[in-house]
Image (spheres, rainbow, N blue to C red):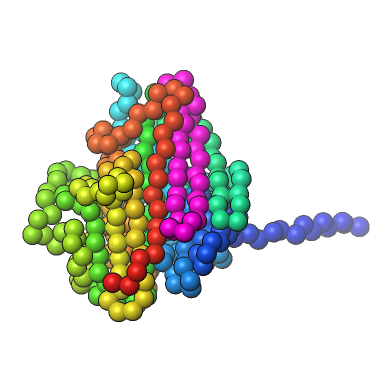
Amino acid sequence: MTLQATAAVAVGNPSGEQIELRHSGQRAIVVEISGGLRTYEVNGHALLDGYGADEMCTGARGQILVPWPNRLRDGRYDFKGTTYQVPLTEPAKRNAIHGFLRWESWTLADRGDDWVVLEHALRPREGYPFFLRLGAEYRLSETGLTATFTATNCGDRPCPYGIGAHPYLRVDAETINDCWLEAPGGRHLLEDDQAIPVGVADVDGSEYDFRAPRQIRQTELDTTFVVSMRGADGRAWVRLWPDGEGPGVGLWMDQAYPYYMLFTGDSLPDASQRRRAVGVEPMTCAPNAFASGDGLIVLAPGEAITSSWGIAPLAQR
């Protein structure tokens, strides 16, 4: 007689554990995979274009981008006299994009009803023989959602580092064409056919000038900007409002983020996801910073750095 054993296989969410936070009409869902932000809504209004618990993340929605945001040309960089090669994760353009942790699990360290702390150990690997410990705290308050990230160099040598995030801001509108956008960039980066910066230009008089609120219309954005305007508290804001009724949404960045990207989604593979939100990517460094050094952070052994950004509802325009 042949004995056959069967085992039940648990089917989990593609983005791992779902951690729900609530505070004063606000609801956010933070996920295990990438330590990202899947959902943020206020009084029933969705202010992020996220994805379902049963769906795989697309378009890097809400993901955390570390140890570099955006692109690295040919996946190659020189650091302290050594050349390193990392895998190409955007092969069509021969780039490595958005670091290593988009599909990695983070560990739940602590949580409350309206806050959570996640942790991840980024161990040395081929092309990045450095050791980072990372912490991510998401917290809801009366002023909105704050995301704070800490990176500590736990290795015995200096370590190159950058971080970004990729939330998509949305409002009550079918498309963003008639929405009003305000953004703090006085200059934007010029790119080559690999989407790697090759220069910089002022936004004055161009389609990229959103320093005063204006409607997006047909403008296509997949563009990196240099922050030129901050408030007295050091924060720079990107703000989006519907043309009609309904609240707006804003994303702020602290002084650790001198760059940000705006993305209208025109190149997303799924046509139904295009131009329904504005991707806002706060970045501590420019694209290709591991190679160019533009904004690159170098952490000494034992050194830590903290950065914060946040999302908040805005009154109707």
Residue 48 shown left or right of residue 201 in the figure = right
The picture places residue 107, in percent across and down from the top left corner, at 59, 44
Farthest residue toward the right?
A: 1
Q: Is residue 73 among what the camera can see? A: no
Taking depth in this image into account, of 148 and 103 the one nearest to the observer is 148
The picture places residue 166, in percent across and down from the top left corner, at 38, 54
The picture places residue 182, in percent across and down from the top left corner, at 24, 61
Q: Quadrant of the N terminus?
A: bottom right
Q: Is residue 48 magenta?
A: no
Which stretch appears magenta? 131-157
The picture places residue 85, in percent across and down from the top left corner, at 36, 33
* Quadrant assignment, res 144: bottom left
Residue 189 shown left or right of residue 16 in the figure = left
* Quadrant assignment, res 175: bottom left
Q: Is residue 314 among what the camera can see? A: yes
> Vertical placement of 12 versus 152: above or below?
below
- For the point 49% across and 56% down, the residue is 141
- For the point 36% across and 76% down, the residue is 246
- For the point 40% across and 23% down, the residue is 300
- For the point 36% across and 38% down, the residue is 162
